[in-house]
Image: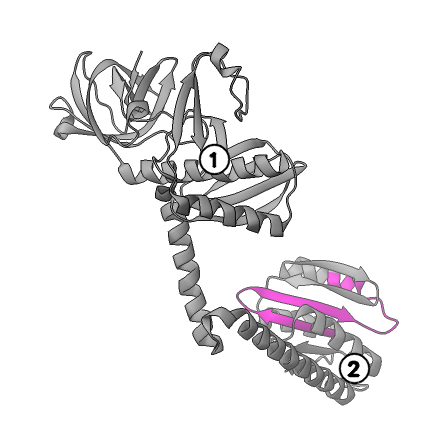
Amino acid sequence: MTEQLYYEDAYLKEFDACVTACRAGENGMHLYLDKSAFFPEGGGQDGDRGYLLSDLFPGGKAAITDTQSDGDDIYVVCDREVKVPAETRVHGVLDWKFRFDRMQNHSGEHIVSGLIHNRFGYENVGFHMSDDRMTIDLSGEIEEKELQEIEQRANEIVWSNVPLHTDVYTEQEAENVQFRSKKELHGMIRVVTIPGADVCACCGTHVRYTGEIGPIRLIAHERFRGGIRIEMMCGRWAYSYMSGILRQNREVSALTSSKPLETAEGVGKLLESEKALKGQLLEMRYAEMDRIAQSLTDKGPVLIFAQTYDPVMVQKLTSKVMEKNGGAVCVLSGNDEAGYFYTVGQKDGDLRALVREMNQTLGGKGGGRPYFLQGSVKADKEKVETFLKEKLPGLLVKRI
């Protein structure tokens, strides 16, 4: 049975221990320790990382990539093959940045989950921590305004800098204690109390005072399995995230010539201006289409390369030219590298055989009504032009 030093002092960064067993595992060598400040994965919190020092390791050092439990025993996972006999003395050093990030976020999650439970009665039914944020799944839905209020209250508890308390109960003693728990518990039960926020059974590591958690931010939420999934971050993760947003906002502020707290309004004005310009451009395009169609009246079969047109404009131009032109009309948009989107049409015509052969010859696909078909080809401009000139004698080629 491994002595759990992280429960005696969650801030212990280095310790001495003895190896009790050394076994090969799928993800590296597993070194079992008689005592450990490395926390094993559990309760949604990652297993600790760091390194072990010993003269028996190659170079005197072995990196620890994970920590896991095996019943009452704890083992660390080494990044390379290290074989040492039992009773080998080692010195462990935690990756403190990795651990403290998770202590901040785990404690912050307790505050948020506890506040929501106290206010709405919802249970935390899922908790996952990644490299820079975490998600919590709750059993009911919460409105945006209410989440903002929860976030505000959570940060007020951080600012109050109250101490966290951990108590350990037997099963019989725990029957007289009210606390949150995701599952039925047996054996000795650890309960973490955050005054004003939460009382919850937990096997993880936590900060001493709420002030150490740092900022708490609820950055996203969505409906999930009849409840809500909240994406959140605390401490350094939240600071880094908000610093990134601030840098982006400064750039937007400069680009829109707006004050930092008025960037949304500045972007809104730009979008309105863009919308107006797009409307003007569309009107110009339609006028251009009408002129092109008029110039091709009764000109016979025609191939038009309209490389700046989008697929909708290609279709509209084809329709307009068809009305004025008695022959087949093919309009393409694209480039030689990516290929071309096409629309082919002829008033009262049947172009299915032509399009079928064009797709086969030019690596294309598409279809539609006999008199109006669309698709795409993977061929360059010269091959498209050569093919259509062979199939449509007298073809007029126009580039716009």
Image vertical order of residue 28 relative to residue 220, above or below:
above
Query: Would you say 143 lies left or right of 170 here?
Result: right
Tell me, yes or no, if residue 328 can be seen here: no
- Residue closer to the observer: 239 or 355: 239
Task: Please tell me whether mark 1 sits on a helix, a strand or a loop.
Answer: helix
- Seen from the viewer's position, the closer of residues 357 and 304 is 304
Give the image location of residue 365, x and y in percent. Answer: 69, 57
In the picture, measured across the screen, residue 135 lies left or right of residue 146, that is left
Q: Tell me what residue is drawn at x 63 percent, y 58 percent.
A: 363
Q: Residue at x 52, y 35 (%)?
A: 114
Instruction: Name the quadrant of the C terminus.
Output: bottom right
User: Which quadrant holds residue 81?
Assistant: top left
Residue linked to disc 2: 300
Identified at 75% across, 74% down, the residue is 316
Q: Amino acid at mark 2?
A: Gly
Position of residue 107 measured from the top left corner of the image (x, y, whole percent) = 42, 36
Location of residue 398 by image quarter:
bottom right
Q: Residue furthest right?
A: 348
The CA distance from mark 1 to mark 2 is 75 Å
On the image, the x and y values in percent for residue 250 come to 42, 69
Disc 1 to disc 2: CB gap under 8 Å: no
Name the outermost residue toward the left.
55
- Name which of mark 1 and mark 2 comes first in the sequence: 1
Q: Quadrant of residue 333?
A: bottom right
Mark 1 sits on what residue? 110
Is label 1 or label 2 in front? 1
65 or 361: nearer the eye? Answer: 65
Magenta-colored span? 328-355
Q: Is residue 213 magenta?
A: no
Dot 1 surroundings within 10 Å: few (below 14), some, or many (20 or more)? Answer: many
Q: Residue at x 55, y 21 (%)?
A: 183
